[in-house]
Image (cartoon, rainbow, N blue to C red):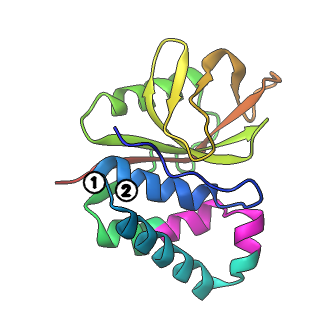
Amino acid sequence: MSKPYQQGSLDGLCGIYALVNAVDFLCGPLSSLQARTLFRQILLHIESKGSLADRCTEGIVINELAGILKFVVCKHYPIKRFKPFHQQPGVSQQRYLQTLSDFLKQPNTIVLLCLEGYYHHWTLIREITDTKLVAYDSSGIHYVLQSSCSMKNDHVERRHWLLPAQTYLLKKSR
């Protein structure tokens, strides 16, 4: 398995790196030129929608990420995207993690999600064990302990908040 591309410490590009790394994980390995080309295509898409400087420093939100997935990633690569928790408030942590785990047991799959709380970070999850969410991440996160997670709307304060509505299941389609 290749190593994920790494983001810098001053940028808010974790969403972009997560997308490049998802393509690399599912369709790669990408050459350095292919990864840079995809990175550039994503930046050009962002620039066409507004301030590139703002997105590079503040990060991208779910609607922007959705557009990049639809108009750049899934347009040029054989990747299908699923958003099983779209407009489903109140999903339990158990149901959420079980859905992700079942999906990841299929070949050629990865999960793109946003972690909040300690981090405000888009990351990829490649496996879920009984105790961990195993990451494929641009900032060096190797795993997140399930015991340190809660759902954002739970009344439990944990280190990491999981956001089902900001979760994409990605699968290589051919």
How far is mark 1 from mark 2, CA to CA?
5 Å
Compared across the picture, whether 30 is left or right of 107 comes to: right
The prevailing secondary structure element of the residues shown in magenta is: helix
Q: Quadrant of the C terminus?
A: bottom left
- Viewer-nearest residue: 118 or 28: 28
Q: In the rendered structure, which amino acid carries the disc numbered 1?
A: Cys
Above or below, 154 against 123 in this view is above
Task: Give how far across and how far down residue 133 sits, in percent.
Answer: 53, 26
Look at 61% across and 84% down and name the residue there.
47
* Amino acid at circle 2: Val
Task: Judge whether 74 appears above or below 90 on screen.
Answer: below
Q: Position of residue 122 (x, y in %)?
A: 61, 49
Name which residue lies at 70% across and 71% down.
55
Instruction: Please tell me whether residue 94 belongs to the stretch shown in magenta.
Output: no
Residue at x 36% of width, y 53% of height: 24
Circles 1 and 2: CB distance less than 8 Å? Answer: yes
Q: Is residue 25 left or right of residue 62?
A: left
Residue at numbered disc 1: 27
Q: Quadrant of residue 38?
A: bottom left
Quadrant for the N terminus, please. Answer: top left
Task: Residue at 81%, 24% (x, y): give it.
Answer: 155
Residue 64 in the image, given as x and y percentages of width and height: 60, 69
What's the magenta region?
54-68
The residue indicated by pointer 2 is 23
